[in-house]
Structure formats: C-alpha cells, structure tokens
Image (cartoon, rainbow, N blue to C red):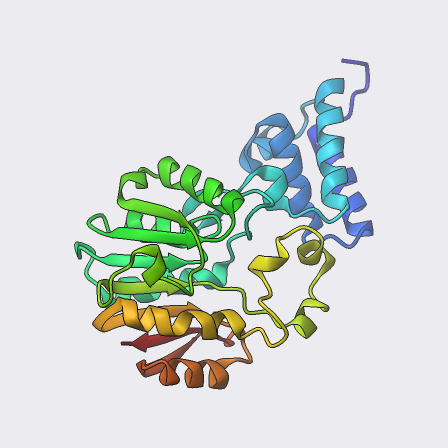
Amino acid sequence: MSAGAPTVREILQKSADFLADRGVDSPALSAQLMLGKALRLTRLDLLLQSDRPLTEAELAAARELVRRRGRGEPAAYILGEKEFYGLAFSVTPACLIPRPETEHIVEEAEARFPRDAALAFADLGTGSGCLAVTLAVRFPQARGLAVDRSPGALAVARDNAARHGVGERLSLVQGDFADLAGLGVAQGSLDLVAANPPYVSEAEYADVSPEVRNFEPRGALTPGPTGLEAIAALAPGAHAALKPGGLLLLEMGMTQAAAVRGILEQAGFAEVRIRKDLAGRDRVAVARA
C-alpha cells in the first residue's frame, strides 16, 4: 500500500460524485453498494471502517464496479442479487430484476390462504423465480410449477429454489405459459395462479430508462404493440387450470385495469378486483375462477 492511499470515506465520496455526474439514481447508495462489493463489506462496515486505506488491488476492483454502474448497468446485476420479500435472490441479465410492486402478489396470497395450506400453484413467467420461491417459502406445504420460456432464466430460478430450500417442491419447466394443458397441468387442478407477465407496450418501452432498456431482457418486459398480448394469451389457460373458486393474481400496467378486467371476464373469471401499489397506481388484478 502506497503512502497516502485513499480511504473508504474518500473513495465513497469520489464514487458518489462520479455517479451523480452520470445521472445514476441514488449515487451515494450506489457508491456504497459498489465499494461494499469490492471490499466484501456491509454498508455498516464501510461506515465503521471509513478511515481505512484501500490497497491498490481493492482500489482497482472498486473502480471497475463503479465504472460499470456509471455506464448504467443495474446495481442488482453487478452485485448478482436482489432482495424480494425479505429474501435474497440471485439475478443475472437472463432474467428481470425483481421489483417491489410484485411483492403485492405475495401479500395478496397470504391474505387469501392460511399459511399451512397445501396449495397447488403455478407461477407463469417465473424469471428469477422470486414469486414461486417466495410462495413456497411462505406456504411450507405448497407445491408449485414455475414456467418460463427462457432456459437462462430457469437456471437462475433453479439456483434460487435450491438456495432457499424449496427445490423439491417446485417443478421448473421451460415452455409457453399460454399452454398449461400442454405442459401437463390438469384442468381444475390449481388453487392459485400467480403471474408477472410482460405487459409494457412498445410505445411505453421506447420511453423506459436506458438502464432498463439496455440491460434487462426485452422479452420479459414487452409482449407486443399493446402490452396486453401475454395477459390475453395466459388468461384462458389459467382459468381452465384453476379449481372452482381458485385465485389468479396478475401484475399489470398502471393504465391497463379496464382492458385487463375485460380480458379476464371474457376468459370466465369473476370477482375481478384491482389492487393498487404503494404509489396508488393500479398494479395487480385479483380474480376468482
């Protein structure tokens, strides 16, 4: 270590300034996350060790991570994980980064079913597996099917299922979630279908942030011109797969409530209710078969 080596505090400040100049959201937090990753320290450890000098190797590692963040690469991909419903999930560019809004699906399931329920459920478009794995953790007697067309996403979901000890109760299948019967799901066999399908219209996709557009998988975000294509495709099969009274919990875009309600009612669902997210925007359709 050379004399006058920069300290944790100094690198945090320089990194935050660098990221702020590049328009990165929450630059101070990003700087902490990147330096913590490089030094294998928690944010609390960084505070406690703020006067610690960095070695040349540590400095080089930190600079590379900060450079990646400065190019707009999402922090979750750099860190390799993201928290969802209090659980840590591995993420890669093969899958969408879990969002807080999706947690409302788990909340709704917990409000509707007892914890010891032996649920049979499906997660359509599982991605990282955050919904399927969390449901299996929260309902220890549940068994689920997690469907995705991306082998890369399924590999991540499989890792997350093993990480949280629910792999034996989840079947991860590559395929089209619009054809549950073709995937072996019997008619009237499920208590719950959860889905966070792609629902961003092509016009909306053109306006998403470069951080999303340049790094997250397009197919997990937009299904076509209107954004409703995937929802329309999955609704009939989901209805057929659910038991009478079974529940569909579906994430959707904030302007899609009327259209989604119409799609679900046409597919045979009843009692369609729209749940808002914490920002007061329409976000989850709750429907009974």
Residue 164 position in % (x across, y down): 35, 39
Q: Is residue 273 visible?
A: yes
Query: Where's the C terminus, which quadrant?
Result: bottom left
The residue under the point 60% across, 77% down is 226
Q: Percent from the top left, x then y, of residue 23? A: 78, 55
Can residue 82 be spotted in the picture? no
Q: Is residue 95 above or below residue 281?
A: above
Q: Is residue 62 above or below residue 27?
A: above
From the viewer's side, name the closer residue of 175 and 279: 175
Left of 230 or right of it: where is 76? right
Query: Residue 166 appears at what percent x and percent y?
Result: 30, 41
Q: Answer with the quarter of the image where residue 269 lies.
A: bottom left
Q: Residue furthest front?
A: 182
Q: Nearer the viewer, residue 171 or 80?
A: 171
> Is the N terminus in the top left, top right, bottom left or bottom right quadrant?
top right
Compared to residue 208, the image places residue 32 above or below, namely above
Left or right placement of residue 30 versus residue 279 in this view: right
In percent of width and height, residue 288 lies at 28, 76
Residue drawn at 78 percent across, 21 percent down: 5
Q: How many marks?
A: 0
Q: Residue at x 32, y 40 (%)?
A: 167
Specify the quadrant of the image occupied by residue 239.
bottom left
Q: Nearer the viewer, residue 285 or 38?
A: 285
